[in-house]
Image (spheres, grey):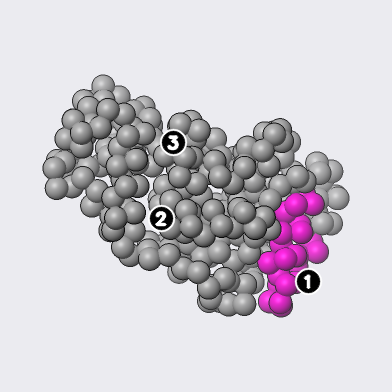
C-alpha cells in the first residue's frame, strides 16, 4: 500500500488498541495490510537480555524451528537481535541494510534462517525507555519477490504512528504480559559463550575481529567498525583462522555453534 491517506487510515486503527488486550494482533493486522504477503514476528529485548517472543503468525513448522534454533542460541547471530543490541537504530530497514554479508553463506542461515522458508526480511525497530527495544520482523515467504523501495516508503509513511502506539502500549509494561509466550532461552549461558569464544587463544584485537566475524561482517565492514584498514583486518582474520583451526568465516561460525550446543 503506497497511498499515504490509506496507509494512515490503516495505521490509525492501532491507536484504539493501545493498552488493551489484542494490541499485538491489531499490530500484526496493520503490518500485513501495509505490507502484504508477509509473516510478522514481534520480539522484545532489554539491553544485554534475551529476546522475548511477543506474538507471531508463523506456521507450526516455523515455530518449531524458532523455538529450537533461534531461541536455542541462533538469535545471538541474528540481524534483528544484533541491531537491537549493538546500535541505537530506530525506524524501518531491510535485511540487506543491517546484515553485512551474504546471509545465504552465513552460519545463521544454515542454523536457522533457511528452515523458515523466508526469502527476504524487513524490520521496524522501536526504542522504549530503560534500554528496551521492540523489533518487528516481516518475512517474505519463499519464492515471493524481494522487498522493494516502495515497501520501505509505505511503512515509513506511518512509522511514527506505529512507533508511538507501541511506545504507549509497552513503555510501562513488563514484557512477560499476556502478549508473551513462556519459552525463554538460557541467555546468560549463551551470551557468555559468544563473548568468550576463542579468547583463550586470541589476542584482544583478534578477539574483536572474531566477534565481528561471528556476526557476519566482511573484512571491509569489520575494518570500518574497528577503525583499521581492511588489510590490517585481514591479517588479524588470518590469525583468527589459524588459532581456531578454521579455514573460513563459515567454519569459525560452525565451531562457535558447536561450542554453543555443548555449553
In the drawing, does residue 37 fall left or right of residue 201?
Answer: right
In the drawing, does residue 14 fall left or right of residue 117?
Answer: right
**How many neighbours does mark 1 have within 10 angstroms: few (below 14), some (14-19), or many (20 or more)?**
few
The image shows residue 259 at horizontal and vertical percentages of 28, 50
Residue 31 magenta: yes
**How many neighbours does mark 3 have within 10 angstroms: few (below 14), some (14-19), or many (20 or more)?**
many
Residue sitting at x 31%, y 63% = 189
Q: Is residue 176 above or below residue 132?
A: below
Where disc 1 sits, the SS reads: helix
Q: Is residue 161 above or below residue 259?
A: below
Q: Is residue 168 above or below residue 39?
A: below
Q: Which residue is mark 1?
A: 16
The image shows residue 18 at horizontal and vertical percentages of 71, 72
Residue nearer the viewer, 88 or 79: 79
User: Between tags 2 and 1, which lies in front?
Assistant: 2
The image shows residue 210 at horizontal and vertical percentages of 27, 39
Q: Which residue is mark 3?
A: 106
Quarter of the image for residue 10 reads: bottom right
Amino acid at each position: 500500500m503506497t497511498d499515504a491517506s490509506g496507509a494512515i487510515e490503516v495505521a490509525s486503527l492501532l491507536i484504539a488498541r493501545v493498552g488493551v488486550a489484542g494490541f499485538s494482533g491489531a499490530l500484526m493486522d496493520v503490518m500485513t495490510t501495509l505490507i502484504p504477503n508477509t509473516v510478522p514476528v514481534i520480539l522484545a529485548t532489554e539491553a544485554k537480555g534475551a529476546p522475548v517472543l511477543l506474538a507471531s503468525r508463523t506456521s507450526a513448522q516455523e515455530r518449531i524451528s524458532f523455538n529450537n534454533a533461534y531461541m536455542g542460541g541462533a538469535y545471538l547471530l541474528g540481524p534483528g537481535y544484533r541491531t537491537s543490541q549493538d546500535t541505537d537504530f530506530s525506524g524501518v530497514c531491510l535485511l540487506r541494510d543491517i546484515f553485512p554479508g551474504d546471509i545465504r553463506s552465513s552460519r545463521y542461515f544454515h542454523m536457522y534462517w533457511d528452515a523458515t522458508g523466508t526469502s527476504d526480511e524487513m524490520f521496524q525497530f522501536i526504542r522504549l525507555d530503560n534500554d528496551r527495544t521492540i523489533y518487528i520482523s516481516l518475512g517474505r515467504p519463499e519464492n515471493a519477490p524481494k522487498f522493494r523501495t516502495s515497501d520501505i516508503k509505505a511503512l515509513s509513511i506511518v512509522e511514527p504512528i506505529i512507533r508511538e502506539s507501541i511506545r504507549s502500549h509497552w513503555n510501562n509494561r513488563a514484557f512477560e504480559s499476556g502478549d508473551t509466550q513462556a519459552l525463554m532461552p538460557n541467555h546468560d549461558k549463551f551470551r557468555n559463550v559468544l563473548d568468550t569464544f576463542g579468547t583463550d587463544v586470541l589476542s584482544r584485537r583478534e578477539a574483536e575481529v572474531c566477534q565481528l566475524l561471528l556476526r557476519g561482517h566482511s573484512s571491509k565492514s569489520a575494518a570500518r567498525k574497528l577503525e583499521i584498514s581492511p588489510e590490517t583486518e585481514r591479517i588479524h582474520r588470518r590469525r583468527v583462522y589459524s588459532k581456531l583451526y578454521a579455514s573460513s568465516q563459515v567454519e569459525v561460525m560452525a565451531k562457535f555453534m558447536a561450542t554453543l550446543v555443548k555449553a
